[in-house]
Image: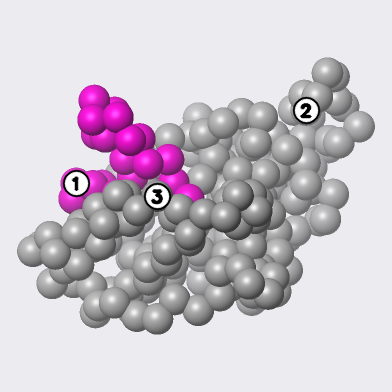
Amino acid sequence: MIVTLKSETRKQGEYVLTRAHDDIAIDLDKMLSPIDLQGLFTSGGPVHVEVGSGTGTFLLHQAQAHPELNFLGIEWANKYYQYSVDRMCRWQMANVRVLRTDARDFIRCYLPEGSVEAFHVYFPDPWPKKRHQKRRFFSPGNIGHVLRCLSSKGQIRTATDHKDYYQVMREVLLEEPDIAAQLEEIDFFPTDAADPGEWVGSNFERKYIKQGRSIQTLAVRKRC
């Protein structure tokens, strides 16, 4: 069963799952592995995945700008997930689905080979403490699964305000032998969701720009 949210069912800042809209939030417990990714959407357009979709700002605006594409947002934080689903329901976004789960596990266990046209990973948690760095999204093992799921000429697009993590991203994508052989660096152009002076158009980016932080971007494309 697919469950979603309804904006008027709030209590102390929370959203309550309802069956008012059954086409936005995904109940992964009811899905088989590998998931029928195209079957989640009403149209057969290419699928883009945003890892860490937060409150859905980028997801909403990018999906509005590209109705020919389908977007799947993955978010672990429950309050952000709930807010995002409610937001997509209110805007009646037919080409957006939102899932609450660990993105690494979902990509590894559920996404079919060659099923994703682009992965958007904006301002991922840098996990700066050494004992936590194994949780980083950009690791050789995890990116190996991302590449398996990426279609031919598919892209990985990322942005961060964390200089050290940016160097890790470059090393994993462009210097790790097995990975770098499959990818080529391309220009990172601002997304359609971005306002002037922005790269992505997410809430995190706008927060960091106000704080005067430098934003670094990276985009790569699968060679075949």
What is the magenta range? 121-142
Residue at far left of view: 177
- Crowding around mark 3 (Cα neighbors within 10 Å: few <14, some 14 to 19, many 20+) is some
Identify whether 69 is placed above or below 123.
below
Residue drawn at the location 24% of the way across and 25% of the way down: 131
Which of pointers 3 and 1 lies earlier in the amino acid sequence?
Answer: 1
SS assignment at label 3: loop
Determine the CA span between mark 2 and mark 1. 35 Å
**Tag 3: amino acid:** His
213 vs 69, nearest the viewer: 213
Q: Is residue 181 visible?
A: yes
Residue with the mark numbered 2: 15
Screen quadrant of the N terminus: top right
Asked whether disc 2 touches disc 3, contact meaning CB atoms under 8 Å apart, the reply is no
Residue with the mark numbered 1: 141
Which of pointers 2 and 3 lies earlier in the amino acid sequence?
Answer: 2
User: Residue 150 at what x, y percent from top left?
Assistant: 34, 65
- Residue 161 in the magenta stretch? The answer is no
**Tag 2: amino acid:** Tyr
Q: Which mark, by number, is residue 62?
A: none
**Tag 1: amino acid:** Gly
Residue with the mark numbered 3: 162
Asked whether disc 3 touches disc 1, contact meaning CB atoms under 8 Å apart, the reply is no
